[in-house]
Amino acid sequence: MALVVEARYTKREILQAYLNEIYLGQRGSTQVHGVGEAARLYFGKAVAELSLAESALIAAIIQSPNRISPHRQPERAVARRNLVLELMLQQNRISAERYERARAETLRLAAISGDSGDARYFLDALSQQLPDVYDADVLSSEGLRIYSTLDPRVQRSAVRALRAGLQRIESQLPGPREGAPPLQGCLIAMRPQTGEILALVGGRNYGGSQWNRCVHARRQVGSVFKPFVYVAALEPASGPLVTLVDILDDAPIEIESPDS
C-alpha cells in the first residue's frame, strides 16, 4: 500500500493529507482532526497566522494529544514544544535568534468554547456524505470548513432524552442476563418545514458502540407508514380516491405483480 501511495502522490502531498487528518485532541466529546482545526481550537486562529512557537506546540502534541494537552498539561506541552524547537535548531531549520525568541514565548491559549454535545454519530454521518459532494483530493487538501444543520442545544437534549428513555425501559424489565448487551436505541430530531436534521443520536454510548443506528439499522416501518397511505388516498392530484366517510372492505385481497 505504501508503494502505491508513493507512486501516485508526492511526499509533500502525502504529508499534507496526513496533517489534515491526524488526531490532535478533544473538544469536549468531539475529536479534533487536522492542524487547521487544532490551530482554531488551541489558538483561535488560522494555520497561516500561527507563530513559530505555536506551530511547534501543535507538532509537539502529535505524539500524545491527550497526555500533552496544552489545556490540561501546559507545563508538559511547553517542554515538548521546546524540544521540537531545539531539534529544528539542530537541523538548521531555524536560526538561533528565532529559537530563543520562540522558546521564550509564553503559552497563550484561546478560550475554550462550549461543547456542542456528544455529536459524534452526527459527525460520522456527515463525513460519510462528503465524498458524494467533494472529490477525494479536495477533502484531503483543501481544508474545508463544513457548516451543518446541527443545533447544539437540541443535540444535548436528544442525548439526555435517549439515555433517560432507555434507562426507564430497562427499569421496568426483568434484570438483564449476565453478559447481555445493554438496550440500544436512536433518535433523530428534524425541522418539519425543511427536513433539516437538528440532532442525531445513533446509540446509547458512542464509546461503547460506533454503529450508527439512525443510518444503518433496517427495521419494518409498521404503522408509522399508515399516514402516508391515507394522504395518498385522500389527496391525489386528480381528486380524492376516498373520503373520511367512506367504508372500506377489510377483506383479504390478492394483488398480482410481474414476479408472481
Image (spheres, grey):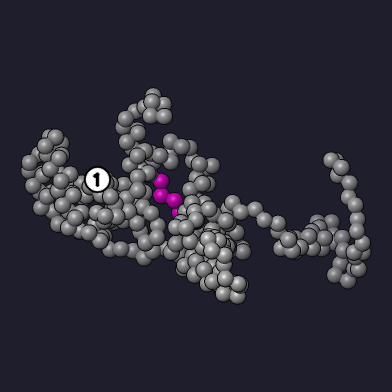
Q: In the visual, does 246 lie left or right of 151?
A: right
**Closer to us: 172 or 218:** 172
Q: Position of residue 200 (x, y in %)?
A: 53, 60
Percent across and percent down for residue 87 are 15, 40
Q: Residue at the location (40% across, 39% down)?
A: 140
Quarter-of-image position of residue 168: bottom right
Q: Is residue 146 magenta?
A: yes
The magenta region covers 144-148
* Magenta stretch: includes residue 72: no
In front of the other: 146 or 225: 225
Residue 161 seen by the camera: no
- Which residue is at the front of the view, 71 or 176? 176
Place of residue 48 in the rendered image (x, y in percent of width and height, measured from the top left):
26, 45
Residue 188 versus residue 123 in the image, above or below: below
- Element class at badge 1: helix
Determine the residue located farthest toward the front in the rendered image: 178
Does residue 224 appear in this view? yes
**Would you say 122 lies left or right of 53 here?**
right
Quarter of the image that includes the N terminus: top left
Type of amino acid under label 1: Ala
Q: How many marks?
A: 1
229 lies left or right of 160: right
**Mark 1 sits on what residue?**
59
Screen quadrant of the C terminus: top right
Name the chief secondary structure element in magenta.
loop
Badge 1 local density, few (<14 within 10 Å), some, or many (20+)?
some
